[in-house]
Each structure stands twice: as structure tokens, then as C-alpha cells.
Amino acid sequence: MRPLHVIEGPLMAGMSHVGDLFGAGKMFLPQVIKSARVMKKAVAYLIPFMEEEKRKAALENGTDPNQPQWAGTVLLATVKGDVHDIGKNIVGVVLGCNNYRVIDLGVMCPCDKILAAAKEHKVDVIGLSGLITPSLDEMVFVAEEMQKQGFETPLLIGGATTSKMHTAVKIAPEYEHGVVHVLDASRSVVVVQNLVNKRTRLPYTKQIAEDYADLRAEYEQQSDEKKFISLAEARNRKLHIDFIKDPPVCKPAFMGNTIWHDLPISEISKFIDWTPFFHLYQLRGKYPNRDFPKLFEDKRVGEQAKLLWEEGKAMLKQIENSKWLRISAAIGVWPANSVGDDIEIYTDDTRTQTQCVFRGLRQQVDLGGKDAHTHMCISDFVAPKDSGIADYVGGFACTAGVGAKEQVAKWEASGEVDKSILIEALADRLAEACAEYVHMKMRKELWGFAPEENLTLEEMLKVKYQGIRPAPGYPTQPDHREKGVLFDLLKAEMANMTLTDSYMMLPAASVSALVFPHKKAEYFSVGHVSQDQVADYSKRRGEAEISVSEKWLNPLLGYDPKKKPAGCGC
């Protein structure tokens, strides 16, 4: 049998069967990924023989052999400024198992590269992925450019920060030839099948467009009904902490910055939260067996989850023995006081010189009711400067991704896609585990405000410790630009971490946070904000135009920046 016939025959048939089983819920994602590894290795083995056939055919009649008969061609890319691609990689594997040719452009892909590749490969579908909120704007930009350039290729949207509602409201209106949000890898095949099939594409995209129009109408109605209090009133309703009755925690045992290199994986792995690891592989049990370790008792996915866990633990040992990954952290504790909605960080305890300022955003949505609700901002958890009370703020950035890129590239080149996905998944878990470890060390030793703390990992994951550690760019402090302030303050580059232009952390398996230890500090979501706060925030940041902050805070805007009222002063 000719090599090409082996690919087109038993290999393609086998992978199609795998895809059918996965779609029917009779095969699990880890098994699909291993099947893809077999396929890739088999094809890699056969390619030299195919190349020889091509040369012979060219000598005989000047034509190339027929290429494999793909079900369609799909281009996948993580958008500009974003470096997370593990979810995209899994989607690529699943589509490959269903006989689709996948063109994977990797991460940090600018729009022009994506569209040029789509034209070059004559793709049937373009898929965009992203993890952080600035990626959402980049996806809108790609949709706008596709419309301008006359594309008719359907556009898929996916990634942790995306949603069906955002796709319907912000992206779909910019492109008229089909925009579909895909929740996870298991849904991607059905969506792509409908988009590639000429008979089903038009009715499918028409139905999606109608569904999204309904979502937009629902969103607009909710937006019209949503009420905001003024920024001045929100500040009056701040979380009022009496810092005399409830003073800040003790003066830190350590102040300044420190860098920890080569933290032992055997120690950090004790702090791994395994539940998100299984969710990545779409192994979700039913209550009461949803989370690790009860997941192993689930009748449907328990056995497969246990096998995957054993495989993960085995690779952790390999990672440590072979030094495939290195874990490091940049940590700091500094004198600080709040000034309005901001937090000043001082060079030393004399508090005469300001190193930097963290800018806060305050909750502004009016929740109604008879009682006035508290409208929080991170600055509420720090003693005001005019109180004369000394307070402090901590912060850290840690990574478990040093070395991951090189190891992933090595395995992808050899077709070992299961290993490349597994090490990325473990690197993410180790980074989160390192954050748990570092925060614990700060509470008990570096800062020392909870020296007697003796929490289990389960208790730590349920936030039973004192204080909070919100991550810049997320609900409590939603401007990703604040990561730049934190990274400069920590000198994070000394711990092998940098930021992209979109303030995405590199390596991808990294975590950063501010540490607020006050016993009344709590996690909250800023939610939508109104124009008066964005204008004030932009002014505090020293920006010439409010549009700069509107771009970065776009998902939070409780108004349409294109419809500013006359005389708003913005």
C-alpha cells in the first residue's frame, strides 16, 4: 500500500472513529490526545516515503500526487499580545482527530499575519483564542479588518476571557459572514462541521446571527435598566474601616524586595489545586464528586481522571529530575498608605518619598434597595495617609514556566502532542501552587502577621487565611496596566518574568498579585463603571485623553464611549 493511501485510509478512518467516539461522550479528551500523538508519529514516519513518491511522480509526468482528502482547513491563532495557547492546542488536536487540516500560527499573532495566512492556505474557518481582556479588543479589530478586506470566512471565538454574550455584543456586529463563540474543544467539531458544509453553513450562521441579535437586545435592555451612583456618592459609601479600632497588622519582619530562584518542585507541588487540571482535560464529575479527589469516585470519568493524575505525577518527577522547568518568584513588602482611591508606595518607613502609585477603581453599580450598599475599592483596605497610621502592602510575581517553551517545542517537533499539552498544564498548576506557597510564606514568615497559621491546602483554596491577594487585571483590580507598576516595583525581570505590550505575563505559566493583610479585606468585583469614574481615573493616571483608559477598561464600561453626551468634558 502506498504511504499516502495509509494516511487516507486506515489512519484517517481511525482518527475519524476517535472523533466520533469523543463527540458521543464515549471517549475522553486525554485518550483523544494520545490518539493524535499516534497519528502524528505515523504521518511523520510516512512523510519521507511520500516525498520519494512525489519525486518519482514528478519525473514521470510532472505532477504531484494527490494530497490527503481533508474535511476542511482551519486556521487557529492566539491574538496579538496574548501568550496562552493550551486551550487552542487542545482544540487543534480534537479537530485533527476529526480529519481537519489545522494551521496553527501559535501565540501573539498580529492581525495582518492571521489574515495573510488565511489567504495563503485558503482556509475554511479562522479561529481566534485569548485569555486576557485586552485580547477581546484585538478580536474585535480582527473582525473589523476581515470585513474591510472582504473576507467571507467564518470566524470562531474562544478562550477563557471570551463569552457568548461578548461575542454577540462586541464582535459579531463587526463581521457579517459568521461569528461563532465556541465554549470548549468538545463543541468545536460540531461548529466547524456546520461551517464547512456548504449545505448547512448558511442556515447555521443565520440561526447563530438571530440568536446573537436576541442576546444583544437582552444586553441593551439590561444596560438601560442598570443604574449607577455618582463617583462622589460611591466614595461616600466606601468600606469604612476604623483603623484605630481595627489597626493594620504588625510591622513586616521583612521590608523591601527579594528574589527566590529554583524553588523545589517537590515542595511547590504539595500546593497544587488539581481540580482545574482535570477541567482542562474536560473531566468533570457530577455532584458530590465534582472536585479532586472525590472526582475519582465519579462513575463516568473517575477511572480516566485517576489515570491522568498518575500520569501527571509521573511527569512532575521527570520535570524535577530533568530540570525541564524552573520556578522563581519576586516578592516585596513596602510602606504604603491610601490617598482617595489610590495607594501610594513609599521608598522607606519615613514615607517622605513615593516609589509608585497603584490606581484603584470603585464599585459604582446601584444595587437598589432601602439600605445603602458598600461600594468597595482596594484602597479601602489600606490606612489613609492623612490618618497618620503606618500601613504596608505586599506583592509578588512567580513563574513555573521557565523552560516550558523549549520543552514544548521539542515534543511538538517529535509529534508527542500529549506530552507538550501535559507539561503546559502542569506548568500552569505549578505557577498557581507557587502563588499559594509564596503567599503562605509571606503571612507566616516574611511579613509574619499570621505566624501561628496552620491551614490545610483545602482551607487555603477556600480562602480561610487572613487578607486577600487580588491579581492586577482581574475583578478586584481590573486594569491590566497595573501589572506594569507591580512588575517594576518587584524588579520581576530578576525572576525571569516580563510583560507583553498587552501586559500578559511571560512565561505564560506565571501569577502576580498584591497582598492586603487587613482582617476586613475581602475579594470583590468592581463590575461596570460610569463615565465620571473613567474620566477621573484617566485624569489621575495623567492621560491627555479619556479614550486611553476607555480602551483598557472597555469590558467594564457602563456606557458606549462612541455616544458621549455633549459637554461631558471627556
Image (tube, rainbow, N blue to C red):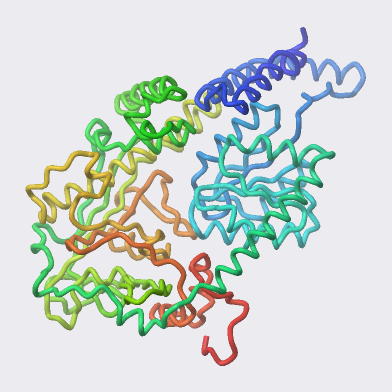
Quarter of the image that includes the N terminus: top right
The picture places residue 223, in percent across and down from the top left corner, at 55, 71
Vertical order, 53 against 397 (above or below): above
Can you tell which quarter of the image residue 407 is in?
Answer: top left
The residue depicted at 50 percent of the width and 53 percent of the height is 161
Q: Is residue 554 left or right of residue 424?
A: right
The residue depicted at 28 percent of the width and 63 percent of the height is 489
Q: Is residue 85 left or right of residue 45?
A: left
Can you tell which quarter of the image residue 88 is in?
Answer: top right
Vertical order, 532 against 416 (above or below): below
In the displayed image of the protein, which residue is found farthest to the right? 61
In the displayed image of the protein, which residue is found farthest to the top? 1
Q: Is residue 546 left or right of residue 392?
A: right
The residue depicted at 83 percent of the width and 23 percent of the height is 66
Q: What number of labels is visible?
A: 0
The residue depicted at 29 percent of the width and 68 percent of the height is 378
Vertical order, 283 against 194 (above or below): above
Can you tell which quarter of the image residue 540 is in?
Answer: bottom left
The picture places residue 111, in percent across and down from the top left corner, at 65, 55
In the displayed image of the protein, which residue is found farthest to the front? 370
The picture places residue 9, in percent across and down from the top left corner, at 75, 15
Q: Which of the two residues, 340 or 243, is positioned nearer the viewer here?
A: 243
The picture places residue 95, in percent across and down from the top left corner, at 65, 32
Q: Which of the two residues, 327 or 299, is positioned nearer the viewer here?
A: 299
